[in-house]
Amino acid sequence: MNIARHVAKSAFRFRTYATTAYVPPASLATLQRARVPPPKPKPESPTFYTGRATYYDQLLALESAAKHTRSALQELELLPLPRFAQENLPPLYGVWKNKLDLGELMSAKLTTSRYRRFIAQLNQLNEYRRLAEVAGHVELAERIQRVLGMFERDNKDAILARGKRKPVKFDEYGRSYTIGRRKESTARCWVIAAQPAEGESASSATPSEATEEVTTEVTASQTPDVPESSSPPAIAASIEGFESPAPSVKVSTTNILINNIPLSEYFPHVSDRERVVRPFRIAGLLGAYNVFAIVRGGGSTGQSGAVTLAIAKALAAHAPDVEPLLRKAKLLKRDPRMVERKKTGRAKARKAYTWVKR
């Protein structure tokens, strides 16, 4: 019974007559309709709604470039590369823009994770560029470099030049100019190959003879003074059973002048003179070069160390073969030790005054 009543109510729920006035279609033509909004333009980039469209567009472009470069290297049979070949590749240096500069370039603030992700793609492309450059495919390397150049720092050359020794310059006379420093001393040094004596060929002086000459200069202060009137033959004749030595052989004239003063006179201590001559001894070039140095500041130890560093740099420039020997002897690196400053309340840097109870 209830079901029949429910069906009857639903049947009479809808009206069978019109409830609004009839409007002819002809009068609707002049009716002003509501303004339809224009359609939204299609975004230029599929990453438009990410909020960082520029960043993701650049990232996708780098990933696409890395993918195509990898395919090109595989076609050239340069990938995969064996481990021993990877270890023998030249070092790779990447100088990319920092997070702030890269964010300004992309008009978006980068987080650390997004910055690292971007730099990882740049490093991957840079490895492919190095591989193409070493293999001799210059055109491929240049195309990769054009992509990487947009994200490198403006002062890339200056940053890569840090820590590298500047090449020693030679003048028109073949002289090298080097600078050495130690403590508060600074030495400017000019080094030139020794010229043979008059009437003598350059190859007449043997290394042992050149060594004897410079050694004589270093130990000149230890040799007792002999009167000028007494010559070696006269002294030898006065001693019974002494045979006259063989005539001396002329060697090339070499000089080491410090502030226009000979080495043996400028440095009275033997240790300072030995320190100056040490680069020549290690390189085996005793008597092969003339040295003229101008030293300012500091004491005898600092000045001798500054001259030593300047001479070692000059010898490495004149004879590149001896550079490994000088570098192994730690003569091409400045001694960083400095005098520690005096402290307040102490007698010296660390020495304390004697404690007195009263």
Image (tube, rainbow, N blue to C red):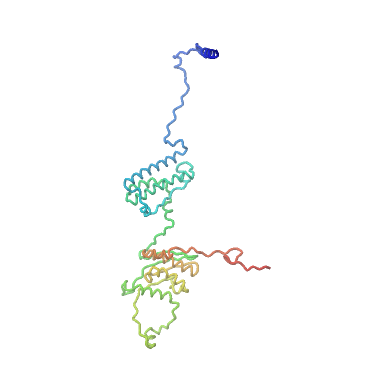
Q: Position of residue 100 (x, y in %)?
A: 48, 46
Question: 189 above or below 80?
Answer: below
Question: 6 above or below 146?
Answer: above
Taking the view exactly as shown, the residue that stands out farthest to the right is: 358
Q: Position of residue 18 (x, y in %)?
A: 50, 12
- Residue 165 appears left or right of 202: right
- For the C terminus, the quadrant is bottom right
Question: 219 above or below 33?
Answer: below
- For the N terminus, the quadrant is top right
Residue located at (66% from left, 68% from top): 356
The image quarter containing residue 75 is top left
Q: Position of residue 182 (x, y in %)?
A: 48, 65
Taking the view exactly as shown, the residue that stands out farthest to the top is: 17
Q: Position of residue 328 (x, y in %)?
A: 41, 64
Residue toward you, 167 or 49: 49
Residue toward you, 10 or 231: 10
The image quarter containing residue 233 is bottom left
Count of marks, rendered view: 0
Residue toward you, 291 or 126: 126
Residue toward you, 203 or 351: 351
Residue located at (37% from left, 87% from top): 241
